Image (cartoon, rainbow, N blue to C red):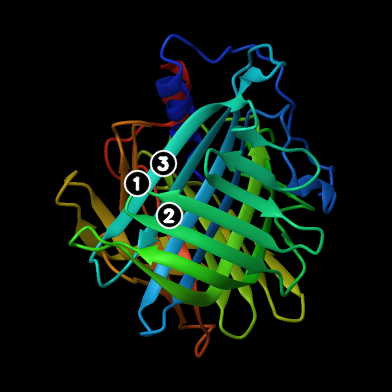
Amino acid sequence: MRAFAATLLALLAFLPTATLPADAPFAEVVPGRAIDWPQDTGAHAAYRTEWWYATGWLDTPDHTPLGFQITFFRSNTGKDGGGAFDPSQVIVAHAALSDPAYGRLVHDQNIARQGFGLAYASNGNTDVKLDAWRMVRAADGRYTVDADAAGFALHLTFTPTQPPMIQGERGYSRKGPQAQQASYYYSEPQLQVTGSVTRPSQKGHGETVAVAGGAWLDHEWSSTLLPADASGWDWLGANLDDGGALMAFKVRARDGHALWAHAALRERDGRTAQFGPADVDFTPERQWRSPRTNTAYPVAMTVRVGAMRWRLAPLIDDQELDSRESTGAVYWEGAVTVTGESGSAGRRGHGYLELTGYGKAKNAADAAKR
């Protein structure tokens, strides 16, 4: 899951006189369309919104754990396109690094219209670029990621160790009670990571270190907004130490109850169990309040998936991503440890938790009307 509203707000911030046409002929997400691998790793320009979202845990030579996130968005504006400067597509990118030595998350972002080879999302294979930031997939499935951001940098290679994890029904992933509230969605868990990271410094001079670790990559595309009464969501993607992979999310109504929820647990041998709304819940265990936005986030959670319980604990509490000066979105997105309890005792892992809508809530319908 990624922020539908954040993407739309970013687009509107970049094109202040524009509105998203309500009747634009975006392609529809429908059940029965299976993920076409590897063709579907590329862009799907006819759909309204799309993202490639990579998160992971890294280890440094001094054994300091780091969390990282990099996301490329593609948004269809509904305008006529073509030519070197294409107003029909906007590319947005976010990157973040969580470093316990620094004490909080650092992040950066960028946005541009597609064109001139400076910003694009290619068809047929993952190759998305925004200025000096790029994610590209090679023929053997490896990803190269480069982002020289403000105060930090990521130069990483992701090597697959497992087949893709196709979410939902062969890739059709429901996000609400209505069938059209859905995306096409697959994940690549248990990616092996090598490369280097430039860490932030309180003194302003970053340190570049070699890193190794594991990552999770999500790719989703859709044309439909979340339910109008959705206030936000909780999402988890976790690589388990035994080779398994766990994904779970809950779309919350304004009163906190679940409008929709889903989870998938894939074992190391490929066996996958799917869990519907009645079998998935996120229960807050501890809150952290941001000193910048005064927003309280449930940074420690227990996730129920069927008969299993998974306890989540943050790498650091302050992993709030505040982009009010550009996209208008404020949310918590951070590295967490995952510990199995009832029904999953003894299992552990590392993942990323995303918490949206806990501050000044903006649902997707509101965002589209701005």
* Dot 2 amino acid type: Glu
Q: x and y percent of residue 118 in the render?
A: 59, 33
Task: Residue type at mark 3: give it.
Answer: Gln
Mark 2 and mark 1 in contact? Answer it, CB < 8 Å: yes
Residues under labels 3 and 1: Cα distance?
A: 14 Å
What separation in Å lies between label 2 and label 1 (alpha carbons)? 8 Å
* Closest to the observer, 269 or 307: 269
For label 3, count other residues whose C-alpha is less than 10 Å away and answer few (under 14), some (14-19) or many (20+): some
How would you rate the neighbour count of disc 1 (Cα within 10 Å): few for under 14, some for 14-19, many for 20 or more? many
Tell which circle, 3 or 1, labels the residue nearer the N-terminal end: 3
Picture coordinates of residue 187, whole percent (x, y): 66, 59
Specify whether residue 262 is in view: no
Q: Does residue 367 appear to the left or right of 33 in the view shown?
A: left
> Is 115 situated above or below 61?
above
Residue underneath mark 1: 331
Q: Nearer the viewer, mark 3 or mark 1?
A: 3
Q: Amino acid at mark 1?
A: Tyr
**CA distance separating discs 3 and 2:** 17 Å
Name which quarter of the figure residue 186 lies in: bottom right
What residue is at 32 percent from the left and 53 percent from the top? Answer: 151
Residue tagged by mark 2? 354
Q: Nearer the viewer, residue 6 or 272?
A: 6
Residue located 39% across and 64% down the image: 198
Q: Is residue 357 above or below residue 146?
A: above
Residue 194 visible in the snapshot: yes
Q: Name the residue that disc number 3 marks.
A: 109
Front residue of this view, candidates 198 and 251: 198
Q: What secondary structure is found at the residue carrying circle 2?
A: strand
Would you say 326 lies left or right of 12 here? left
First of labels 3, 2 by sequence position: 3
Q: Is residue 64 left or right of residue 269?
A: left
